């Protein structure tokens, strides 16, 4: 394959990998619930956190004009506990509150109620029924020497996986070699370092099948198995 086509293939693999990582981050359960609400003719942008480190209170901050007041209603999630309410305090241009810290893997569901005269609004804005608030999950701090290698191996594992798929479509001999690199990186990052990250963050080594239903763990296991099967099926091919 010409050098220019090889460069284009790797550029495409990089774009796909970065794009999918950004999409997963923005649609994942830890991405803040955000939007803009209208209250009495005023546009109020909001950003409600959905993850926090265990041992630290969950901050709630809303930038709004002086005439706006409000409160935060919250309870542990999932539970049938009645909602508890905390008044938002004015700090300059912001209304602020702090929700109590929870143990690793503990969750809180919370709503922000704002009023300005006769007008009122509840955040996050409802997108569908039944109504759900922002759900924040608490996690333990993960040491950098565990987290950074995990992120790096998973990113480059996905990069080589995309490159291998594109090379196979282009009938490049390097496809099998790239698939091996992808498999080994995903194996180390997902099934060796991944459980260590889970243990630090949530107190459990593995919460996917057959012990639980964690989507990230299950997706990682499926990816490793799929690439392992692809390598077995492609034995004898060039590369």
Image (spheres, rainbow, N blue to C red):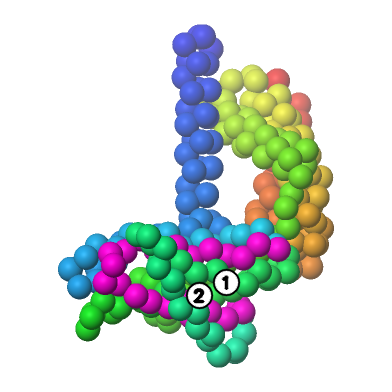
Magenta-colored span: 55-77
Q: What's the residue at 50%, 75% (across, down)? A: 110
Question: Of helix, strand and loop, which one carries label 2?
Answer: strand
> In the image as oriented, which residue stretches furthest toward the top?
3
Q: Are marks 1 and 2 in contact (CB under 8 Å)?
A: yes
Q: How many C-alpha atoms fall within 10 Å of the one at disc 2: few (<14), some, or many (≥20)?
A: many
Magenta segment main secondary structure: strand
Look at the picture and state if 165 lies above or below 129: above
Look at the picture and state if 85 lies above or below 26: below
Which residue is disc 1 drawn over?
A: 99
Image position of 66 (left or right of 167): left
Nearer-the-camera pick, 103 or 148: 103
Is there any visible trace of residue 4 in the rendered image? yes
Question: Of helix, strand and loop, which one carries label 1?
Answer: strand
Which residue is disc 2 drawn over?
A: 110
Image position of 113 (left or right of 166): left
Nearer-the-camera pick, 50 or 23: 50
Residue 195 rendering spot, x and y as whole percentages: 79, 52
Report, in whole angstroms, how far the alpha carbon at label 1 lies from the one at label 2. Answer: 9 Å
Image position of 18 (left or right of 161): left
Q: What's the residue at 47%, 47% (across, down)? A: 23
Q: How many C-alpha atoms fall within 10 Å of the one at disc 1: few (<14), some, or many (≥20)?
A: some
Nearer-the-camera pick, 227 or 153: 153
Residue 9 shown in magenta: no
Q: What's the residue at 44%, 71% (across, down)? A: 89
| Dot placed on the residue nearer the N-terminal end, 1 or 2 | 1
Q: How many marks?
A: 2
Is there any visible trace of residue 215 in the rendered image? no
Residue 57 rendering spot, x and y as whole percentages: 62, 65
């Amino acid at each position: 394959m010409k050098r220019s086509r090889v460069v284009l293939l790797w550029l495409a693999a990089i774009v796909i990998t970065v794009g999918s990582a950004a999409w997963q981050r923005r649609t994942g359960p830890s991405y803040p619930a955000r939007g803009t609400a209208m209250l009495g003719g005023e546009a109020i942008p909001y950003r409600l956190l959905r993850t926090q480190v265990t041992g630290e209170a969950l901050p709630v901050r809303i930038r709004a004009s002086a005439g706006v007041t409000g409160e935060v209603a919250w309870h542990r999630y999932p539970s049938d506990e009645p909602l508890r309410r905390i008044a938002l305090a004015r700090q300059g241009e912001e209304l602020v509150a702090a929700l109590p810290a929870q143990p690793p893997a503990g969750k809180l569901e919370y709503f922000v109620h704002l009023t300005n005269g006769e007008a009122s609004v509840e955040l996050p804005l409802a997108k569908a029924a039944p109504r759900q608030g922002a759900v924040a999950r608490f996690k333990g701090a993960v040491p950098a020497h565990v987290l950074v290698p995990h992120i790096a191996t998973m990113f480059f594992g996905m990069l080589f996986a995309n490159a291998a798929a594109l090379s196979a479509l282009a009938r490049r001999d390097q496809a099998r070699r790239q698939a091996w690199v992808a498999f080994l990186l995903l194996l180390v990052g997902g099934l060796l370092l991944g459980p260590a990250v889970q243990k630090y963050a949530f107190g459990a080594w593995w919460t996917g099948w057959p012990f639980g239903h964690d989507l990230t763990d299950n997706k990682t296991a499926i990816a490793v198995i799929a690439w392992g099967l692809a390598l077995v099926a492609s034995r004898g091919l060039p590369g």
